[in-house]
Image: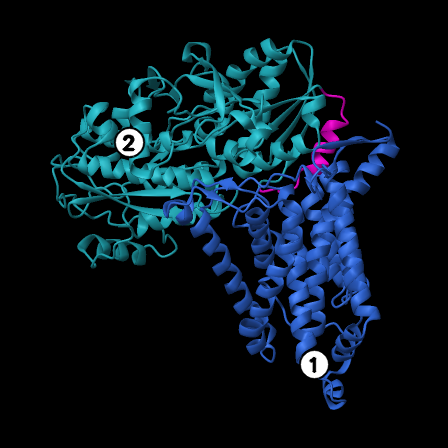
Amino acid sequence: MARDTKPLNRRDVLKATGVAGLAGLAGCTGGGGGDGDGNGGGDGEDYPSLGNYPIEGDTATFGFNVPQSGPYASEGEDELRAYQLAVKHLNEGGGWVDSQFDDLSGDGVVGYTIDYVDGDTATDADQARQSASGMIQRDNAIMISGGSSSAVAIAVQGLCQNEKVMFMACLTHSNDTTGKDCVRYSFREMFNAYMTGQALAPVVKEAYGEGLKFYQLYADYSWGQTQQASMNQFMTDVAGWEQVESVATPLGTTDYSTYLSEAQSSGADVLILNHYGLDGANSIQQAVDAGINEDMEIIVPLYNRPMAEAAGGAIENVYGTLAWDSQIDNAPSKEFTEAFQSEYDRVPSGPAQVAYAQTLQYAAAVERAGTFYPPEVIKQLEDYEYDNIGMGSEVMRGCDHQAQRDVPVVKGLPGSEQESGKYYEIVNITSRDDLGYACDAGPAAECELGSYE
Amino acid sequence: MSILSDIILILLNGLQQGAIYVLLAVGLSIILGTLKFVNFAHGALYLIGTYAGVFIALNISLSNGKLFEWGFTTFGLDLGFFAALVLVPILVFVVGLLMERFVARPFYDRPDTDQILVTFGLAIVVQELFRILFGSNSLPFDQPETILSFGSFAGIPVSGPVALPIVGNFPQWRLYVIGITAVLVALVYIMVEYTDFGLVVRAGTRDAEMVRLLGIKITRPYIVVFGIGAALAGVAGVVGGPLNVVNPTIGTNILVPAFLTVVIGGVGSIAGAVVGGIVFGLTTAALVSLAPAWSQVGLYAIAAIVLLTRPQGILGDEEVAP
């Protein structure tokens, strides 16, 4: 299915000419002289060429750029399953296409059949950029989606802004993705570290009391940095706690024992582990092995299913937030879980739900716009209100392209009560009204989206 | 917290982090020293050891990979950790023999670069094979609760924290890792230094041709050396596996630190591998404790300093170094 080798067409020749003519600018989408009359499907409106628009032929290609290796590989694997399911439903119907997205027909998107290519970001920004670049240049992808690692999402969305190809961010949780690094061509469904802090602070204050001291370890890149800053802000302001220290650990660290010894001897009451994916599974497991949970309370701000699966019983009573969970009781959540289970015989993770939702969200916006022409699709998504992906009533805010949505807060179950797909109990689904920030406040204050064209 | 407890913690953490590298480096180093063979697939042996350890010791539920798709929902014999500690080295020893016969031997007389390419390729093949079979998802490798439990004897508890004087709670299993490493390395050292077999191996290292002229078949000891090196990597996988979660990349991730340990300690010397591992572990632990931002750099800085000032490694013998 992936990476079909098409014969050379007019657009490729134009591109090659453009690149050759602009030596040194290799990597730009050439074809500026194209007259935009190459529409093969139902995309009837005439818009100028932009990025990979117009699409040659009658197949539109999506690029799914996920970590298939590196510390977030487990998350990436589940995302890819969801992307493949989304493409299948877009072409053949099924899942939310039939039940939740009235804009979608289940017979392709505005007359085009959807195909996809996938790539491996290796949880590394440079590799992710190269992979996305290949999808844009070689495969003529009209939309890129992916993430797991904010460093990756930020790098790729920057590239997409330059190339005028849309990016539907999947799992990225850094404040910067829709803060200082925000771009016009990217939209994020996932909430951010700031909202995690807002959602967790009242819950842990209630559970553990006021006046505590906390110690943080964080993954040393965009996500971890903003995550620990937000935790510091809200644990201090809302819970009335005091930070003892916050220590950076390199992404991909496998042995946290020395870091944990330091935390253990710091005199703090609470340990906040701002680690995700494999790193999170390792750090929490090692914290429990060291008996830290006997002396301190542990918080893992951002959870997901593969992580909980790997950490096993170590997550008992550990609070955190997650993108989505199959235990959430509403129609879209159940439908997605059923569709995913019938396809893959497994319970979907939070990142999978985000991947699936983002792909359909993009396709539905294309249908509403009646074209793949990116600026029109972007306008359809900006300030779009929806209530069809299982996370309550949401709005994709126009000023920073950040979804305003509820955030589930969970607590890990003991190992004996865990079973496949059920690793935590949902403590609270924090309403979007209690979360977020205005367009001129918080991370959004630093966001400048850039141009449509 | 007192300075004394800080120092003890750094020592303990350093030793336990170094221990796994020592086990790998001893195997790498004797293979490199005696056979002059650069084995980049050594990490793959660690990987095989870890998965074999999970298979023998536990019975875990699968949710990914081809095995799951083929209908295997659980994986493992649930024989307990001690069984894994005994059986895995034997299994990986055999894997080592096969690797020696079919991968290493045809490449003994080829340049280092060829050896690196073929073994690195093999490492990737093994890694991807495990990824296909088990998926990229991480498997939990729980630390053993107890070892040596027979009948009415409940066994020795080895998991969870243990309260140490001065420093307080410390993960008990990590102390056992240090102990198991020490015993195994001592055994290998005695074998190489004080047995006839060791004598032949050491003589062969000095001058293989002369040993052959004396009528000694040197091929067999060499195969055994390869197997022992492999078995040590397998043991490292079993004792090191429960320290982290298990996934197909652990083999390649541990390869570079293991090679650096050999470089720091000196090729072909068991004592060198031990010193390298300890220097390596202590440096990382001390830097994490004092200047966390430099902890990753520190390791490579030490390797660079050793290479510049003493290219053969701290305890390396210039003649033996390839």
How far apart in space, not on screen, are marks 1 and 2 (Cα)? Answer: 62 Å
Q: Colour of chain B?
A: blue
Residue type at the position of mark 1: Ile
Q: Is residue B316 visible?
A: no
Measured as percent of width and height from the top left, residue A303 is found at: 51, 28
Q: On what subunit does the disc labeled 1 rest?
A: B
The structure residue drawn at horizontal position 80% and vertical position 75%, both measured from the top left corner, is B196
The residue at the point 19 percent across, 45 percent down is: A59
- Look at the image and say whether residue A256 sits in the magenta stretch: yes
- SS at badge 1: loop
- The verdict on a common chain for dots 1 and 2 is no
Q: Which of the two discs, 1 and 2, sits closer to the camera?
A: 1
Q: Amino acid at mark 2?
A: Ala
Shade of chain A as shown in the rendered figure: cyan
The disc placed on residue A386 is none
Which secondary structure lies at badge 2? helix
Relative depth, front residue between A344 and A220? A344
Q: Look at the image and give the residue range highlighted in magenta.
A: A252-268
Whether A270 is drawn above or below A285: the answer is: above
- Left or right of A56? Residue B93 is right
Residue A144 coordinates in the image, percent (x, y):
33, 40
According to the image, label 2 marks what residue? A339
Seen at 15% across and 48% down, the residue is: A57
Residue B97, picture quadrant:
bottom right
Magenta-drawn stretch contains A453: no
Give the residue furthest to the front. Answer: B152
With respect to residue A327, does A435 lie above or below?
above
Which residue carries the number 1 mark? B218
